[in-house]
Amino acid sequence: MTQGLGTQLRHLLDLLDGPVAQAYALQGLDWRPRYTPVMRALIASEPRTVGQIAEAAGITQPAATQTVNLMIRDGLVSSTPSPTDARQREIRLTPAARALLPKLQACWAATAQAAADLDAELARPLSQTLADAIAALERKPFGQRLADARSDT
């Protein structure tokens, strides 16, 4: 039986995220892979609002909100009211998060090397295929593609 696209993507994510999470644990880090894009966005520039984090990290605002909330709970980021806009909150790395940076950066370098190894083994790099798929879905969302498919039948 052929697996559907969603099933394949979830399986691929399991095959990637599980070992990455284990690599963090082997380094003594209690770190979720989903924290990485938020951490990288804040390393590049802080403070940032959740919306700015989402944009910089290339994730949705709801995903950024959920991740920031988890990171607040884990003591990795702080959230304070913006001095210029009371509706916004400024997100910053905590000293605890900064202390993790050397080990995280070593893990990120190993992950990048492993990803390059995987890309080299494939007929077409997975990273490029994913980038192309994301760009195509940004041009024409999957919901529109579904609506078009329904109207064709």
Image (tube, rainbow, N blue to C red):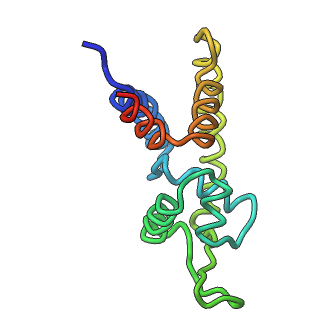
Q: Position of residue 122 (x, y in %)?
A: 58, 11
Q: Nearer the viewer, residue 122 or 3?
A: 3
Q: Position of residue 19 (x, y in %)?
A: 43, 32
**Is 88 situated above or below 144?**
below
* Residue at 33% in and 24% down: 4
Q: Position of residue 1 (x, y in %)?
A: 24, 12
The residue lying furthest to the right in this view is 45
Q: How many marks?
A: 0
* Residue at 59% in and 57% down: 38
Q: Is residue 13 left or right of residue 83?
A: left
* Residue at 59% in and 10% down: 121
Q: Is residue 146 left or right of residue 93?
A: left
Quadrant in the picture for residue 99: bottom right
* Residue at 63% in and 33% down: 131
Q: Nearer the viewer, residue 133 or 77?
A: 133
Looking at the figure, which quarter contains the C terminus? top left
Q: Is residue 30 left or right of residue 79?
A: left
The residue lying furthest to the left in this view is 1
**Is 53 situated above or below 102?**
below
**Is 135 situated above or below 66?**
above
Q: Nearer the viewer, residue 50 or 91?
A: 50
Quadrant in the picture for residue 50: bottom right
**Is 10 situated above or below 37?**
above
Quadrant in the picture for residue 5: top left
Q: Position of residue 23 (x, y in %)?
A: 48, 36
